[in-house]
Amino acid sequence: MTKKKRYTDALNHPIFEYISQAATDLELETYVIGGFVRDYFLKRNNQQDIDIVAVGSGIELAQAVAKLLPNKPKVQIFKTYGTAMLRYKDVEVEFVGARKESYNENSRNPVVEDGTLEDDQNRRDFTVNALALSLNKADFGNLLDPFNGLQDLESKIIKTPLSPDITYSDDPLRMMRAIRFAAQLNFTIEKKSFDAIAKNAERLDIITRERIVEELNKIMSSPLPSVGFILLHKAQLLSRFLPELTNLEGVEEVDGQKHKDNFYHTLEVVDNISNNTDNLWLRWAALLHDIGKAPTKKFHQTLGWTFHGHEYVGSKMAYKLFKRLKMPMNEKMKFVQKMVLLSSRPIVLATEVTDSAVRRLIFDAGNDIESLMTLCEADITTKNPLKFKKYHQNFELVRQKIKEVEERDHVRNFQPPISGELIMETFNLKPCREIGVLKEAIKEAILEGEIANDYQEAYDFMLKKGEKLGLIKSK
Ligand code: ATP
């Protein structure tokens, strides 16, 4: 008989010795399970999260482990879930007692009973997430793989351990997770499973928006986000939470004139930008940069298809979308709005670059000018190689121009050289409308290049402009 392979090299981290010792002391069968084991076999190096399952009390085990550990870490206990968590060195370890679950219609929170390791593996979402390695002294490192998850890892396939229809209906979050793993790991979803997702799509409505966004952000952070978005769309899930995006799908033709399919174009832009940035919010900006095109689309006899003001409309829609999905309403949302609003500006510049237009762009984009240029370059999805090259060269020119103008005029973090106080003092004014008018006029004159971004020139300009407004210089 061949001896079964032990995967002890997966368990090199010192934490496993401590867990194994505590399990022996308590006489608890104990295993490491889920993502950690999956990622070991996939040779992914993100093994900071460790899930431990004990046939018995996970909380007791966690407490016993903490006592053995040299730094005696604090154990965080989540009574409602029967789980406990502690940190040791670079890892975060979660302990849970093996359980059996049963679900009802309206909630993804199951009724839970104590169970065996097998019961616990049955409740796992995917075969590749049900792999467990033994931490028991007798067979340390032994693999328990009742659903052939290892084979599925090799075939790069997402399957559920039990019937997919029941698995997804019980906890519809798993539909998002299936697609997220497919995108993250470049796996395919087994056909039976994918069909069950599409069938249960409307069950997604019992999932909180926060959980949906969490998965969405992971899809967005994957190497080719379009893979996940196309699966979400095909499974009828995407329109349930991002109808703004799916409304961009389709090509209309009038008088022989077509516009591009802005849904698939958008996904290309997201993929392009993902090659150049890890910034999740810039990826979101790419996803939303054209959403204003659906409500602004018009066919014009001479101009053809137009999307007038779509950037402005899109930036307003981005605000509502963030709010609806309970996403952060802070500077991250403002950044996305700003990128959407400015997303066409460099494109206009690429055909005619004037100093004043460049100054205005730098002024409006501020420190986000670099991100904006990255977005605009990602927006080039033409399949014509000549045009592709030409557009990129044009943006290269815009970048150079931005650099030159910024070095000379310093408008990036523009602080007007004349303050409101100085205007009040100069013309002996109390707070009034004219102060704003003068400040705006100075700013405009600088951006237009009529005067330099310089105190003396701005001061002289203020005197002249003030005089025109009928203000009198105080002595
Ligand atoms: P990642 O860390 O990339 O999110 P993970 O698989 O570790 O991957 P977790 O959310 O930490 O994801 O879940 C840990 C394990 O718990 C999973 O591997 C899986 O076995 C199980 N699990 C998580 N969520 C579910 C769920 N909704 N239904 C069934 N099992 C789940």
Image: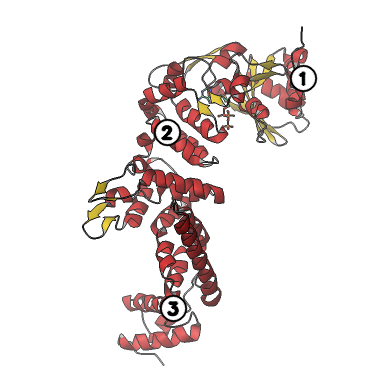
**Residue that label 2 marks:** 232
Local packing at callout 2 (Cα closer than 10 Å; few below 14, some 14-19, many 20+) is: many
Q: From the viewer's perspective, is residue 209 above or below residue 202?
A: below
Mark toward the viewer: 3 or 1? 3
Residue closest to the eye, 414 or 409: 409
Name which of mark 3 and mark 1 comes first in the sequence: 1
Q: State the image coordinates of residue 150 (x, y, percent, origin top left).
A: 63, 21
What mark, if any, has residue 455 been given in the picture? Answer: none
State the SS at label 2: helix
Mark toward the viewer: 2 or 1? 2
Q: State the image coordinates of residue 6 (x, y, percent, origin top left).
A: 75, 18
**Residue that label 1 marks:** 21
Q: State the image coordinates of residue 202 (x, y, percent, origin top left).
A: 35, 26
Local packing at callout 3 (Cα closer than 10 Å; few below 14, some 14-19, many 20+) is: many
How many marks the image carries: the answer is 3
Name which of mark 2 and mark 3 comes first in the sequence: 2
State the SS at label 1: helix
The amino acid type of the residue labelled 3 equals Ile
**Residue that label 3 marks:** 446
